Amino acid sequence: MQSTKLVILGRDGILNEYREGHVAAPEEWETVPGALEAVARINHAGWHVVVATNQSGIGRGMIDMSDVNTVHAHMNRELMAQGGRVDAVFFCPHTPEDDCDCRKPKPGMMLEIGRRYGVDLSLVPMVSDTLRDLLAAQAAGCAPHLVLSGRAKGLDDEQIQLMVAQVPGTRVHADLGAFADFLLTQDHHADSSAGSLA
C-alpha cells in the first residue's frame, strides 16, 4: 500500500497566471485566485505537493537559475502565508530543440519524481492546463487532470472535448480549487470505504 499521497502540479497557469515570455521576477508572479488556498487544503488533508515545470527560458538565455530560484522562493513565501507548501520544484531547463527526456510532454520529470518519492505514479494525480502536460501525465502513467485556468481558460466545450479525447481518463475542473474539492471528496470516500466492514 502506498504511504505517500502525492500530487504533481504544473506551475504557470495553475498556481500563477500564465504570461507570454517567462516569470523572471517576483513582481511578475500573479497568483491564480484561490490556487494557494487549494494547495493548503490539499496539504492539510495529508497530501504532498510537488511542481513539475518546463523552464526553457533558462536554455534560451532569457532567465537564469538565480531568477528561477528567486521566483520559487517568492512562491513558497506566498504559499506559507496561506498555510500551504510545495515539497519540491522539478524543472526542465532545456529548449524543445535539445530533445531531452525531461521536457514535457516527455515523462522524464514525473518518472524522476516517482523514483524520488518511491510512489506508484498510477496513484498520483497530475494537474495540467495544456494538452502537452496531459500527454506527459499519460506517458508517465499519472492520473490526468485538466484545469480551465491558464492556457485552457476560454476554451469552448468542443475544444475541451477534443483535448480530453486525446488523453482518455482526463478529468476536467474549473481551477485548482475545484480539483482540490474533487481530490478531497475522493479521499474521504476512500477512507470511508477502508473503514467499513465488508
Image (spheres, rainbow, N blue to C red):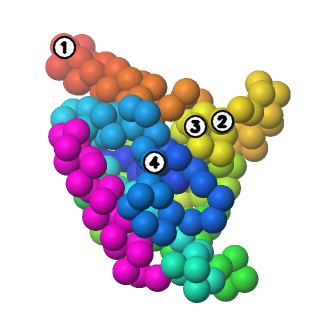
Q: Residue furthest front?
A: 27
- Other residues around mark 3 within 10 Å, as few (<14) / some (14–19) / many (≥20): many
The answer to whether residue 131 is visible is yes
**Cα–Cα span, label 4 and label 2:** 15 Å
Q: Which residues are magenta?
A: 64-85
Q: Which quarter of the picture shows residue 115?
A: bottom left
**Cα–Cα span, label 3 and label 4:** 13 Å
Q: Which mark is residue 197?
A: 1
Q: Which quarter of the picture shows residue 62?
A: bottom right
Q: Which residue is mark 2?
A: 153
102, 58: nearer the viewer: 58
Q: Amino acid at mark 4?
A: Glu
Left or right: where 182 falls relative to 165:
left
Q: Which residue is mark 3?
A: 149
Check whether the beta carbons of the residues at disc 2 and disc 3 lie within 8 A of each other: yes
Most frequent secondary structure within the magenta stretch: helix
- Helix, strand or loop for disc 1: loop
* Percent x, y of residue 151: 65, 45
* Percent x, y of residue 90: 40, 68
Check whether the beta carbons of the residues at disc 4 and disc 1 lie within 8 A of each other: no
Q: Which residue is mark 4?
A: 30
**Foreground label between 1 and 2:** 2
Q: Earlier in the sequence, mark 4 or mark 1?
A: 4
* Percent x, y of residue 103: 59, 71
